[in-house]
Amino acid sequence: MTLRQLELLIAVAETASFSRGAELMTLTQSTVSQHIAALERELNTRLLDRTSKGIYLTAGGEVFLQHARRVLAELDVLKQAMAGFHGLENAHLTIGASNIPANYLVPRLLPLLNQQYPGITVNMKIGDSRDMLSELHNGKIELAIVGARFDEENFSYQPILKDRLTLIVGPDHPLRDKQKISIKELVRQPLILREDGSGTYQTLLKAFAGAGIDASSLHVVARLGSNEAVRQAVSAGFGCAFVSDLSVRSNLQHGELFKVDVRDLVIERNIWLVRLLERTPSPASLAVSELLLQMTGALGTPQAAVN
């Protein structure tokens, strides 16, 4: 059974004529007769009585006609819904973001999104970078914005922004007035770190290894699961920490936190826009991705996507 057969049956029933129904559908009468005969054989039900006085619907034909009209009406609704989907008039997009992008990039994106695509509603999940990639792999989100790149072949990574990790201390910390310290001094400092799955922690590990710092020699006093918790602990005078420059710009300007450089240790990373390679992107995800790239483009030159 095809939609075309439904349309042909309706045309013949409404015109009460094979010839007029065929003309309405721009087909030959014999073609229309063959389609309806095939439909009757498939259903094992006579739908039309062909008499010398004209064409009449059988009882089975009346039932069929009623449902056929409903099916085609729903088809029109479906077409309208898909037109709205492509036109981004009423689209819902679920994304995931790790701590830094969730708090310092996505909020900046939303006003721009509302201006250019007011029909898109964004639902955001928040977790560490590895958690968000797991959500992406399981199909629970369509895009992920994270601070770490893991070597997995089924993801496409688009770097959208360069972010620097800055060592911060609180107003009462002994290092607040020191512009620069050595790596040896750093190793002696009480240090707060993020959790294992965070992009910040993964970036730190690579930077420490590159600088010849044994991570096990660090004086780690706490492992906290969010950037905000780390920032509040340092502000209260509990140790020091490496955090995203994006997250503390305002605090540094207002003297709530203080930046300390470490000689021979510059820690930079990409913020990544990630999608699942095997999933076809929706128009909403393409629109949001393009807008995000435009927003972050002034802060860093986007590179080609990396599989």
Image (spheres, rainbow, N blue to C red):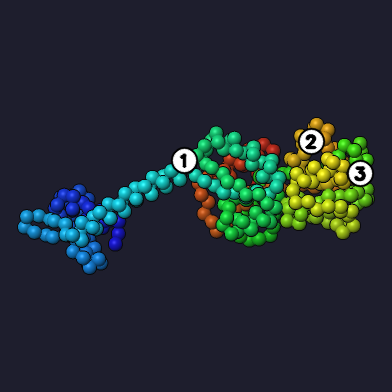
In which quadrant will I find the N terminus?
bottom left
Number of the front mark, 1 or 3:
1
Q: Is residue 294 visible?
A: no
The answer to whether residue 246 is left or right of residue 145 is right
In the image: residue 299, left or right of residue 171: left
Query: Residue 191 location in percent, x, y?
Result: 86, 50
Residue that numbered label 2 is attached to: 251
The residue tagged 1 is 89
232 versus 115 height, above or below: below
Rate crowding at label 3 as few (under 14), some (14 to 19) or many (20 or more) other CA atoms within 10 Å: some
**47 relative to 167 in the view: left or right:** left
Q: State the image coordinates of residue 202 (x, y, percent, origin top left).
A: 76, 54
Other residues around mark 1 within 10 Å, as few (<14) / some (14–19) / many (≥20): some
Which of 110 and 19 lies nearest the eye of the viewer?
A: 110
**Picture residue at 77% right of the left edge, 46% below the top:** 229
Above or below, 49 against 229 in this view is below
Residue 118 can be seen, yes or no: yes
